[in-house]
Amino acid sequence: MPQEEESLGKAVDGRLVRRLLGYLRPYRWTVVAATVAAALQSATQVVGPYLNKVVIDRYLFPTPAGRGSLLAGILPHNALRGVTELGVIYLSVLVVGFVLDFGQTYAMQWVGQYTMYDLRREVFHHLQRLPISFFDRNPAGRLVTRVTNDVETLNDTISTALVALFDDMFVLVMIIAIMIRFNWRLSLITLGVVPLIFLATHFFRTAVRESYRRIRIYVAQINVFLQEHITGMAVVQAFNRERRALAEFHDINREHLHAWISAVFAYAVYYPAVEFLSILAVTLILWFGGLRVMHGELTIGIVFAFIQYAQRFFRPIQDLSDKYNTLQSAMASSERIFRLLDTPVDATAAPEGAAEAGAAPAAAPGRIEFDHVWFAYKGEDWILRDVSFAAEPGESVAIVGHTGAGKTTMISLLLRFYDVQKGRILLDGVDLRAWDVHALRRRFGIVLQDPYLSTGTIADNVRMDDDRMPAEVVREAERQANLTDFLATLPLGDATPLRERGSGLSTGQKQLVNFARALAARPSILILDEATASVDTDTELKIREALERMLAGRTSILIAHRLSTVQRADQILVMHKGVLRERGTHQELLRQQGIYWRLYRLQYKDQEARPGGARKLEAVREPAPS
């Protein structure tokens, strides 16, 4: 991750610029209008010194040369009236400049916000379509940085830097043209300090570039660190790691501080340096221009105008240098954002004709078949090895085995979070890879070991924000999941609002909401992945009472370490090191005295320690009389 954050690329990458400009296409006429307004506003900035020159040379210190201005034909000879009219013109120019500046600033800020709205929406939509394997490789804090910091950097570029670059260039060109027209010698003196400014700008850009690179690295690290530790705060506190976590955060935060201090130092040196050089230019103008005035070669108005133009000349140079750094940051941010957007989504996208292939058997009851399935997360480190079995419609299938045996992986493959490398998985006779992924997942209801709830009401979590779901369906799902008694204790019932991740509810209560959510979707296939592993005994009893209603008429896949929850399954699959080693009913597997029998003995060995426990356990091994 730090290496990617370091990537800066070119200062101006044409490929990235063209792609960024594509997001401006819907607002192109607004951008054109803002650019025209910026050009006109730039013109108003150079009018003021010229008007001052006319006032001085025509009315305050009149000279023959001063009467030859562009406004000579419309200005009166009376000094009071002339100064008044020029003052009104100056005020009008300022008002027009204010209106133009407001218009172009508001327009570009508006364009920037809408462009970032579009981009954030596209990035989040793309994140939702990425395979789960992508999130295995990328920490959440890193992705949050993409959607927040990197997008905001682009916003700064679009809303301020883009038009400001044209604005500054217009001002510079017009000031140079006017100064050369007034007096080319004074123009050379004014421009004589420009090489020194370019040299200072070069060192400034180099220093700030390095500082910004470090800032980006540590911002990403801070986001990742905060996401991990705030999410896992209970573990941090339970193991008394607050002091160590604070020390680690202190190190990252300190590096981020030092990076910003370096940037602040560069700005603190650069801007006073440019200001000093601009004052030096003004001093040279006063010296050289004053001598020329004394010899009658220049007017006071021209010298005064040159001083004002010199002061306005160096301000755009400062802005251009700052905008250069902003543009360079935008190139780095856009490169990372577009790399994310270019991440392929074909792991979850259906091939051509998938919708037709998946639509035909949509009403089928839900037959699942694993046909010689091999799967590895990386290379040939196989998690599943040649797994084959079938779950008939309405049948309950339990999957048991030691941790790491591949149980949860089988569920991930069913939902197409990953695709198999060898073999195939069929749902109602159709290869999963031929299904539209959304149509496929609508067939499943799933309850995981870690109950996930989002911000909103309990009813919102049951219906998963599907506003089309009738309230009666929600109530029936809550009743089937034995959630009704708990809701009766809440003043607002299922309209009770929940905080982030269901904070305020116990694990068992959150799990009951998850069961209701799975049922509300009316799936034909129900998956329970260690759904009772983290609940209390009372909640587990409620869930067991609801299971018979939940599993009736549905194909069900149950993953459990507690063998008491799978004994009634129609078929039990015993996984060991990615291989399907045993298959049968509870009594059949006990009679085989294999892996399942050993797992059963391990879980119930405490019964052997009690009087008569061994005889009871031995009796369990015998098949029930037919």
Image (cartoon, rainbow, N blue to C red):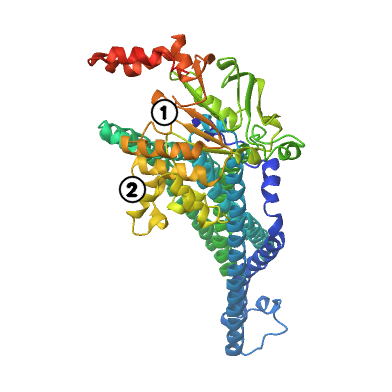
The answer to whether residue 38 is above or below residue 375 is below
What residue is at 62 percent from the left and 53 percent from the top?
118
| Gap between marks 1 and 2 measured at Cα | 28 Å
The answer to whether residue 191 is above or below residue 101 is above
x and y percentages locating residue 313 in the rendered image: 58, 59
Q: Report which residue position mark 1 lands on.
A: 565
Task: In this rendered view, identify the residue nearer to me: 269 or 417.
Answer: 417
Secondary structure under the numbered disc 1 in the rendered image: helix
Secondary structure under the numbered disc 2 in the rendered image: loop
Residue 449 in which image quadrant: top left
Residue 211 shows up from this direction: no
x and y percentages locating residue 144 in the rendered image: 49, 42
**Residue that lies at the very extreme toward the left in this rendered image:** 611
Amino acid at pointer 1:
Thr
Q: Report which residue position mark 2 lands on.
A: 504
What residue is at 35 percent from the left and 50 percent from the top?
485
The answer to whether residue 527 is above or below residue 329 is above
What residue is at 34 percent from the left and 55 percent from the top?
490
Neighbourhood count class around disc 1 (C-alpha, 10 Å): few under 14, some 14–19, many 20 upward: some
The answer to whether residue 338 is above or below residue 406 is below
Contact between marks 1 and 2 (CB within 8 A): the answer is no
Left or right: residue 127 compared with residue 353:
left
Of callouts 1 and 2, the N-terminal one: 2
Closest to the camera, between mark 1 and mark 2, is 1
Amino acid at pointer 2:
Gly
What residue is at 37 percent from the left and 52 percent from the top?
487
